[in-house]
Amino acid sequence: MDTALFFEIHSDLPREGPGRRLYTKKAFDMIPLLQQPRILDIGCGPGEQTITLAQLSDGDIIAIDIHQPYLDQLMERARQAHVDNRIQVRSLSMKSMDFPKEYFDIIWAEGSIYAMGFQNGLQAWKQFIRPQGYLAVHEMSWIQPNPPEEIANYWKKEYPGLTTIENNLSVIENCGYTLLDYFPLPDDAWWELYYRPLEQRLQELRKKYKNDPKALQVIHHEQEEIDLYRKYYHWYGSVFFVMQKQ
């Protein structure tokens, strides 16, 4: 995909994946109260959940992403919310983190762990969590078995690691975590701050690139994901898993 076009599509959106403050809070409330926790937000994007974490805790947060404009947007939001004194941003890949061992009380990742794969992420990030610390992620999962062929084939190509909730629960246990709880993100978490603004952006860009077949192909691919969710949302979604390091 054309990187410049990708970021034109995705720049200045409220979120870069499903989620809402309500569901960040629901997951955070599953973690016992910690005084001034060190929190790492991996793949933070423009940082809607980062701000929420700062508001829900009295801790310090390091937020990482590989796209600097997202980090700039996050810090502007943090200043507006008066929590910028407790948030640091770093342009850093989740695959090359260099933090001290057992440094964080909580690692948080909303919709980003797919970049490594669920099991790989749980294994790689565990070293950075203090003993009995916490990891909260949401990950794409099949919510019902035996999905229709159209959507099964789409995700087999787009994200071969997509599996059932039950399989992900087994991965959590096998990677040395204790599950605290989990919940699928409801339909509104996809539409309110993600797909609806994204779909509006795609409509605008179709007009801009009406004479550019390659750009229109990229736009069509983005629209396809939205259309398939609209059609098959009962079969799959993003599931929040909150766990504790054993």
Image (cartoon, rainbow, N blue to C red):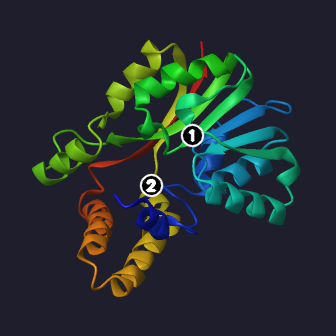
Q: Is residue 223 left or right of residue 246?
A: left
Image quadrant assignment for residue 108: top right
For this rendering, which residue is in front, 30 or 37? 37
Identify residue type, mark 2. Pro
Give the mark nearer the N terminus: 1 vs 2: 1
> For the residue marked with disc 1, what is the amino acid?
Ala
CA gap, disc 1 to disc 2? 18 Å
Which residue lies at the image location 82% right of the left edge and 39% below the top edge?
60
- In the rendered view, would you say 86 is above or below 96? below
Which structural element holds mark 2?
A: loop
Q: Nearer the viewer, mark 1 or mark 2?
A: 1
The answer to whether one can see residue 139 in this image is: yes
Looking at the image, is 235 positioned above or below residue 107? below
Badge 1 density bin: few <14, some 14–19, many ≥20, Cα 10 Å: many
Residue 172 image label: none
Q: Secondary structure at mark 1?
A: strand
Q: Give how far across and how far down residue 22 sits, in percent.
A: 62, 55
Q: Which mark is residue 186?
A: 2
Residue 204, image quadrant: bottom left
* Residue occupying image coordinates x 42% and y 39%: 114
Q: Split into 4 quadrants, where in the image is the N terminus?
A: bottom left
Count of residue discs: 2
Q: Position of residue 96 (x, y in %)?
A: 57, 29
> Which residue is more in the foreground, 131 or 90?
90
Q: Vertically, is 162 above or below 89? A: above
Q: Residue at x 85, y 33 (%)?
A: 36
Q: Which residue is mark 1?
A: 109
